[in-house]
Image: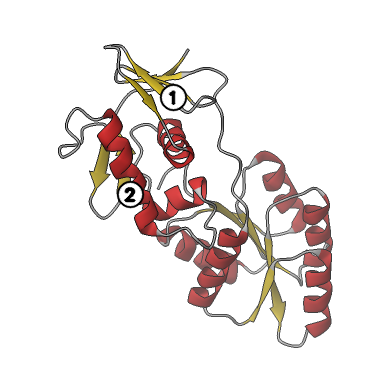
Amino acid sequence: MDAADPQILIVDDARDIREPLGQYLRKQGFRTQLAANATEARGIVAGSLLALVVLDVMMPGEDGLSLCRWLVARGGPPVILLTAMSDETDRIVGLELGADDYMIKPFNPRELLARIRAVLRRIPPPEPKVATQNRRFAGWLHDQTQHHLAHTDGRKVDLTSGENRLLAVLSDHPNVVLSRDRLLDLTAGRDAKAYDRAIDNTVSRLRRKIEDNPKIARLIVTEWGGGYRLAAQVTEE
């Protein structure tokens, strides 16, 4: 698990719910933070980059609906509410406040996991970060704004938008294995036309443009069962 994995905040006053759920989500590839009340949650939100909040409605002190209203008002991460079977009004109010989904207690963690992934797929990805300086790696100079690569030996390469985005993401995480799912999220936002093979095809095209031997890739390395990794040191200039 690394800093590229989505981070989930679980807010529930019941320890026997939040701690096992945190452990379960970590096993599924998420980073998690836990809060027992709204006050703890606000402190975590202020200091963390969160992908999603799983939020219990019924808590002592400030309840989950109030915290949900605060999260939505500040443009915070998406919210999945946890509600009691009888709290239909709370579910309706939560959705009207801007919650993205809800689960009724008791719930199956696998179903909650599926709902988390579904919500995250609907969230537009951040715009690919454009470096204020050019990126240099393995003799190549990558100008993201111009979709262009230049090598110290004189080679020059133009990149398509998809190739440019993928190389930008890989160079944001040098020597870190990024799964196909993660690469799709960061480059395509999981839109309706995106699929795993799209990443493989873009990698193949990039390799033909920048590898000395595309059949024996040494820069964009395949990690079997994992994804892809840019095997190079990256600097900005």
Q: Quadrant of residue 49?
A: top right
- Residue at 72%, 42% (x, y): give it: 46
- The span from disc 2 to disc 1 (Cα, nearest Å) is 19 Å
- Residue at 35%, 57% (x, y): give it: 197
Is 142 situated left or right of 222 in this image? right
Q: Is residue 231 visible to the viewer in this orientation of the structure?
A: no
Residue sticking out furthest to the bottom: 86
Q: Which amino acid type is marked by label 2?
A: Asn
Position of residue 13 relative to residue 137, above or below, is below
Name the foreground residue: 37 vs 116. 116
Position of residue 36 relative to residue 133, above or below, is below
Q: Is residue 131 visible to the viewer in this orientation of the structure?
A: yes
The reply to whether dot 2 and dot 1 touch (C-beta < 8 Å) is no
- Residue at 61%, 61% (x, y): give it: 122
> Could you tell me how many numbered marks the image carries?
2
Q: Quadrant of residue 29?
A: bottom left
Position of residue 25 relative to residue 176, above or below, is below
Question: Which residue position is annotated with label 1?
Answer: 148
Image coordinates of residue 134 in percent, x first then y, are 48, 18
Label 1 secondary element: strand
Image coordinates of residue 164 in percent, x first then y, are 45, 34
Label 2 secondary element: helix
Res 201 label: 2
Is 13 situated left or right of 178 in this image? right
Image coordinates of residue 5 in percent, x first then y, are 47, 48
Image coordinates of residue 140 in percent, x first then y, are 34, 19
Q: Residues within 10 Å of mark 1 (few under 14, many from 20)?
A: some
Q: Earlier in the sequence, mark 2 or mark 1?
A: 1
Is the image coloured rainbow, by chain, by secondary structure, or in one colour? secondary structure
Name the foreground residue: 19 vs 206. 206
